Image (spheres, rainbow, N blue to C red):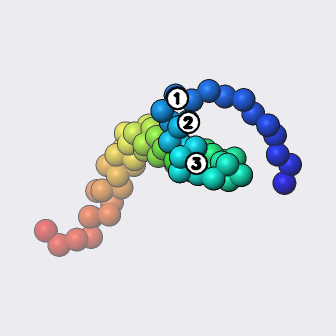
């Protein structure tokens, strides 16, 4: 897998915590894993939001279809 070198800034206390808890030669992999986890979380949230919006947009159409079929479906039922 091809790797890229990125430069970014983080708060000093976070950098110190990273240095204290993760070995120097393992920091890049640690940060990459953390970013990947966060990206998956964001992707899931975006998917949930898209589904919510889709369901809301179709709600009235689905209700109309149910109304159209309610009477023919119940026609043969004993009353």
Q: Secondary structure at mark 2?
A: helix
Task: Tell which tag, 1 or 3, sits nearer the viewer.
Answer: 1
Q: Residue at x 35, y 52 (%)?
A: 66
**Viewer-closest of 51 and 13:** 13
Q: Position of residue 45 (x, y in %)?
A: 48, 44
Can you tell which quarter of the image residue 77 is in? bottom left
Residue 78: assigned label: none
Q: CA distance from mark 2 to mark 3?
A: 14 Å
Residue 27 lies left or right of residue 76; in this view the side is right
Residue 40 higher or lower than 78, as above or below: above
Q: Is residue 56 something that shows in the picture?
A: yes
- Disc 3 designates what residue? 34
Q: Position of residue 68 (x, y in %)?
A: 36, 50
Q: CA distance from mark 2 to mark 1?
A: 5 Å
Q: Is residue 68 something that shows in the picture?
A: no
Q: Residue at x 72, y 29 (%)?
A: 7
Q: CA distance from mark 1 to mark 3?
A: 18 Å
Residue 7 higher or lower than 63, as above or below: above
**Viewer-closest of 11 and 66:** 11
Callout 3 environment at 10 Å: few (<14), some (14 to 19), or many (20+)? few
Q: Secondary structure at mark 3?
A: helix
**Viewer-closest of 49 and 13:** 13
Task: Tell which tag, 2 or 3, sits nearer the viewer.
Answer: 2
Q: Residue at x 79, y 37 (%)?
A: 5
- Disc 2 designates what residue? 15
Which circle's residue, 2 or 3, is located before the other in the chain? 2
Can you tell which quarter of the image residue 10 is in? top right
**Viewer-closest of 46 and 24:** 24
Kindly check if marks 2 and 1 are in contact, taking CB atoms under 8 A apart as contact. yes
- Disc 1 designates what residue? 12
């Amino acid at each position: 897998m091809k790797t890229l070198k990125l430069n970014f800034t983080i708060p000093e206390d976070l950098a110190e915590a990273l240095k204290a808890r993760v070995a120097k030669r393992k920091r890049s992999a640690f940060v990459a894993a953390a970013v990947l986890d966060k990206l998956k979380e964001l992707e899931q949230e975006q998917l949930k939001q898209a589904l919510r919006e889709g369901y809301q947009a179709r709600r009235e159409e689905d209700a109309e279809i149910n109304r159209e079929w309610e009477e023919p479906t119940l026609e043969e039922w004993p009353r």
